[in-house]
Structures are given as structure tokens and as C-alpha cells.
Image (cartoon, helix red, strand yellow):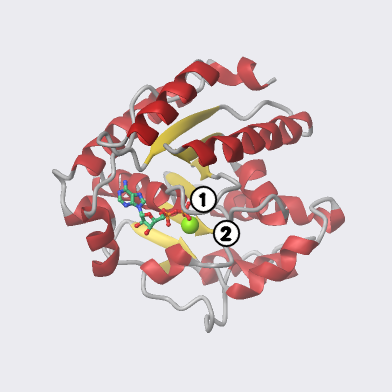
Amino acid sequence: MRIWAVANQKGGVGKTTTTLALAGLLADAGKRVLVVDLDPHGSMTSYFGYDPDTLEHSCYDLFQHAGLIPAHLPQQLLRDTSHENIKLLPSSTALAVLERQSPGKDGLGLVISRTLAQLDGEFDFAVIDSPPLLGVLMVNALAASQYLLIPVQTEFLALKGLERMVNTLKMINRSRQQSLPYSIVPTLFDRRTQASISALRMLKKQYPATLWQAYIPIDTRLRDASRAGLVPSRFDKSSRAIVAYRALLKHVLNECLQPKNTAAVA
Ligand code: ADP
Ligand code: MG
């Protein structure tokens, strides 16, 4: 199973949308895909019609067995989605209490990594959506992954948040055997605004090696997809954002074969 995380310490930058778009495209291609919702807000979980406020079982159960995850637990937690090839490991609001704990305590930082190891063989891909906060949950997402996508909104204020995320990654890389390769993904690009254009220019200058060379445009059809509860690729295959996400998927699959940008974060 290939495991990717989508993370940024800033909210509203397109993390959940990117996770859904990539998972949907992989699933459309016949891959068996697991999406993991590690954000206590549970946007992804809500998207698929489950209520993170009232769900009785969620990723939180896994953290209660951090030391030794019972053999059947990960399987029991899986939920069906609107896409026959996608299963969801849902979030619940209870996850928020974990943010105040230390990832080093009782193996708390490796819960998702261990869970996915138990589900290996059942899925071709896992895509993890993360909370906009550096804590136990984000550490879990990064520790479990082989590749990271960092969506960044193409506006000036978001660039500061990106710097913080890249520094977090450097810190986390120190405790990993291997640096986590990543791509920065410009999102919510509006070619009519100077703000988007100059933010993209700055990104190109500051992150020449790790910036994906295209962008995800603003596309209101993504919002319609979310209202319909369908993965974006099922809503409108010709939407500009979906076309861009298809190119992003190709890029990530390529990068995974030859992870050449690890040096930049080492
Ligand atoms: P995050 O998970 O980082 O908080 P979301 O993926 O939830 O961000 O995106 C924030 C909001 O922006 C959502 O309402 C989402 O539907 C919308 N959105 C995301 N990407 C696009 C896009 N390319 N075009 C238009 N709206 C988008
Ligand atoms: Mg989100």
C-alpha cells in the first residue's frame, strides 16, 4: 500500500479537497483506496455523510489502544463511502483531546502507521487528511506516510504558514530514518487577481525544487461536488480543478517512483 499525507498547519488551504480529489481519481482508476480523516473537525467524515460529533467509533478508538492495536479493530472501523472503491477511517470530535498530548508518549505518534500496516494488502493507496495543527495527529500522518502534499493557498498570508509547515517537516525528518519527500501544491489560484499571481511567483522563487510546477485553479464546481457528497472526480470530470488534480496525481505517482527531492529537506 502506498501512503500519502496531505498537510499544512493552515486551515482552508484545500487539504480536504486535495485528499478527496486524489482519492477519487485513484478510485476511478480501479484502485482500492483508504481515506483517513485525522482532522477532529471531520470535514472529510461529514463529506461522506457521517457526523463526527456523534460517531461512536472512529480513529479515536485506535489511540485508546496505542500500545497494542487489537487485530480486528482497524477493519471494524472502516466505513463505506459514496464511491465503491473508497473506504473511510472516520474522524470524530473526540480526537481533539489528543492534540494536547505528547507524540512520544506510549507510542502515540505511531498509531496510524501501525494501523495502516495492519490494513496493508487490503488497499492499494491510503490518503491521510490532517488537522491544521502540529500535534499528535499531524505527527501520526507524517510518520505513516511515504509522500507528503502541502497545499498552499495562492495568497500572501498563506506563504508564512507554508514556511512554518516546511520547518515542521524538517524537524520531523530528524526523527525519521528517511526524509519524507514532498510537493508544495498551489491551490485556489485565481488568475484574475494580482494576489494569486504574485503569490505563485514568490512560491516559484522560494521553493524551486519542491513546488509542483502547475496549480489548482479556483473552481466553484468543487463546492457543488461537496454538497452532493460525491468525490469531485465523479461530479464533473471536465472541471478545471479536476483536470489539474489529474495532472497532480500523475506528478505524485512519478515522484514516488523516483523521490529526488528528499535532499532539499534533509
Ligand atoms: P482545508 O481542508 O485545508 O481546511 P478545504 O479543502 O476544506 O481546506 O477547502 C476550504 C474551502 O475551499 C472549502 O469550502 C472548499 O470547498 C473550497 N475549495 C477548495 N479548493 C477549491 C478550489 N480549487 N476551488 C474552489 N473552492 C475550493
Ligand atoms: Mg480540512
Residue 38: give its label: 2
**Local crowd size for mark 2, using a 10 Å CA cut-off: few (<14), some (14–19), many (≥20):** many
Q: Position of residue 144 (x, y in %)?
A: 62, 44
- Asked if labels 1 and 2 touch by Cβ distance under 8 angstroms, the answer is yes
Q: Is residue 138 above or below residue 56?
A: above
Is label 2 within 8 A of ligand 2 (CB to nearest ligand atom)? no
Residue 173: give its label: none
Gap in angstroms between the C-alphas marked 2 and 1? 7 Å
Amino acid under disc 2:
Leu
Q: Position of residue 177 (x, y in %)?
A: 74, 28
Amino acid under disc 1:
Ile
Classify residue 164 by image quadrant: top right
Dot 2 falls on a residue whose secondary structure is loop
Viewer can see residue 134: yes
Residue in the picture at 44% in, 63% down: 44
Q: Is residue 129 above or below residue 100?
A: above
Decide which of 11, 63 is in the foreground and name it. Answer: 11
Q: Position of residue 125 (x, y in %)?
A: 44, 44
Residue in the picture at 70% in, 63% down: 69
Dot 1 falls on a residue whose secondary structure is strand
- Tag 1 residue: 128
Decide which of 9, 102 is in the foreground and name it. Answer: 9
Q: Quadrant of the C terminus?
A: top right
Residue in the picture at 48% in, 31% down: 184
Position of 43 with respect to 135 (left or right) is left
